[in-house]
Amino acid sequence: AQRVTQPEKLLSVFKGAPVELKCNYSYSGSPELFWYVQYSRQRLQLLLRHISRESIKGFTADLNKGETSFHLKKPFAQEEDSAMYYCASFDNNDMRFGAGTRLTVKP
Amino acid sequence: GAGVSQSPSNKVTEKGKDVELRCDPISGHTALYWYRQRLGQGLEFLIYFQGNSAPDKSGLPSDRFSAERTGESVSTLTIQRTQQEDSAVYLCASSFPPGPQQFFGPGTRLTVL
């Protein structure tokens, strides 16, 4: 079965510092990988997907099939990036979310 | 409406009582998903509806949980004989076409005393 692991429940960085939220997946096929974000008092929403290879709000994520990872990165964190981040995998209508990482960006 | 809506936003109930949670998906979205989020844990898939097809109930944790959807509209998640471990935020999401780009509702926070 698919599994998505986010090893860090909490991550705290200072404004302007680089940030990396880790995500590892275990799946024998070729799932699509995603990052979802939930800002305070807002709904969970899609941040980015690996197939689009885009940068959203300065965040990027590269799928590394060898390491089965899909880490989310941003070179210079901003206070407004503070939120809950969920990594997710999707294959054949089976959507799996990780436990989430709460990112706090301190001034 | 502009987005997925859920009601109630909060529900406190006593152990053993039945509860019904409602989800109104975005109009035209054929796929509807229910998830459960326990404190400190990730989103746990419960059930998936797609159009008039038989729902995927593989995530329902026990036979106390059931869900219905009328056509491509409202869905209700029913939990019978609630237990304290049912306390969680229940999230609904919809999409079109079915897939991972899902639009989430605000959730219903269920507390079982």
Image (cartoon, rainbow, N blue to C red):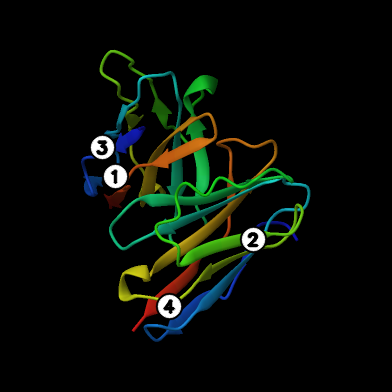
Separation (CA) of disc 3 from disc 1: 6 Å
Q: Are marks 4 and 1 in contact (CB under 8 Å)?
A: no
| Residue at the (52%, 49%) spot, across then down | B57
Q: CA distance from mark 1 to mark 2?
A: 46 Å
Q: Nearer the viewer, residue B51 or A13?
A: B51
Question: What is the crowding at mark 1: few (fewer than 14 residues within 10 Å), some, or many (at least 20)?
Answer: some
User: Is label 1 in contact with label 2 (beta carbons under 8 Å)?
Assistant: no
Q: Which mark lies nearer to you, 4 or 3?
A: 4
Label 2 or label 3, whichever lies nearer to me, is 2
Mark yes or no: residue A74 visible.
no
Query: How many neighbours does mark 3 have within 10 angstroms: few (below 14), some (14-19), or many (20 or more)?
Result: few
Task: Please state which amino acid type lies under the numbered disc 4.
Answer: Arg
Q: Residue at x 53, y 29 (%)?
A: A92
Which residue position is annotated with label 4? B81
Residue A15: give its label.
Answer: 1
- SS class of the residue under badge 4? loop
Along the horizontal axis of the image, is B113 left or right of B65? left
Amino acid type for the residue under numbered disc 1: Lys
Q: Chain of mark 3?
A: A
Q: Position of residue A38 (x, y in %)?
A: 45, 52
When asked about the image quadrant of residue B97, the answer is: top right
Residue B49: % across, % down: 63, 48
